[in-house]
Amino acid sequence: VYADAANEELRLVIGVSRHGARSPQAIMPFNKTSEQFDNTTLLLATGFLQHKLIGYNLRKRMIDEYHFLPEVYNSSQVYVQATDKQRT
């Protein structure tokens, strides 16, 4: 059903995002790249960059494009849930 966007109001946004690239959970002897990982399940440098890009894109859409959130952060307007694991 098509609705007139001018008469609509955005009230809620739910975003789900997966962790960025990380080292394997277990080092397998047949994996020729296994020796490059010091620890298992930790985010790689690429994974940190992926997280940064996710945040950049969320800000661009929610603040700059849709004006759903103000430019100045207000903790009462945002709910975030995450685990306490380094890998996420």
Image (cartoon, helix red, strand yellow):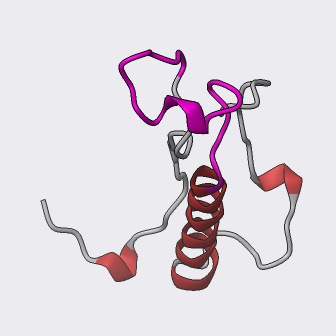
Q: Position of residue 29 (x, y in %)?
A: 43, 15
Q: Main secondary structure of the magenta part?
A: loop
Q: Position of residue 66 (x, y in %)?
A: 52, 77
Q: Is residue 34 magenta?
A: yes
- Residue visible at 53% across and 15% down? 26
Q: Is residue 3 magenta?
A: no
11 is higher (above) or lower (below) than 79: below
Q: Position of residue 1 (x, y in %)?
A: 12, 59
Question: In the image, 87: left or right of 12?
Answer: right
- Residue visible at 75% across and 75% down? 70
Q: Nearer the viewer, residue 3 or 26?
A: 26
Q: Nearer the viewer, residue 85 or 36?
A: 36
Quadrant, the C terminus:
top right
Q: Position of residue 25 (x, y in %)?
A: 54, 19
Q: Quadrant of residue 28?
A: top left
Question: In the image, 23: left or right of 73?
Answer: left
For the question of whether residue 23 can be seen, the reply is no
* Farthest residue, direction left: 1
Give the mark count: 0
- Residue visible at 79% across and 24% down? 84
- Residue visible at 65% across and 63% down? 52
Question: In the image, 28: left or right of 55?
Answer: left
Q: Which residues are magenta?
A: 25-45
For the question of whether residue 47 can be seen, the reply is yes
Q: Quadrant of residue 8?
A: bottom left
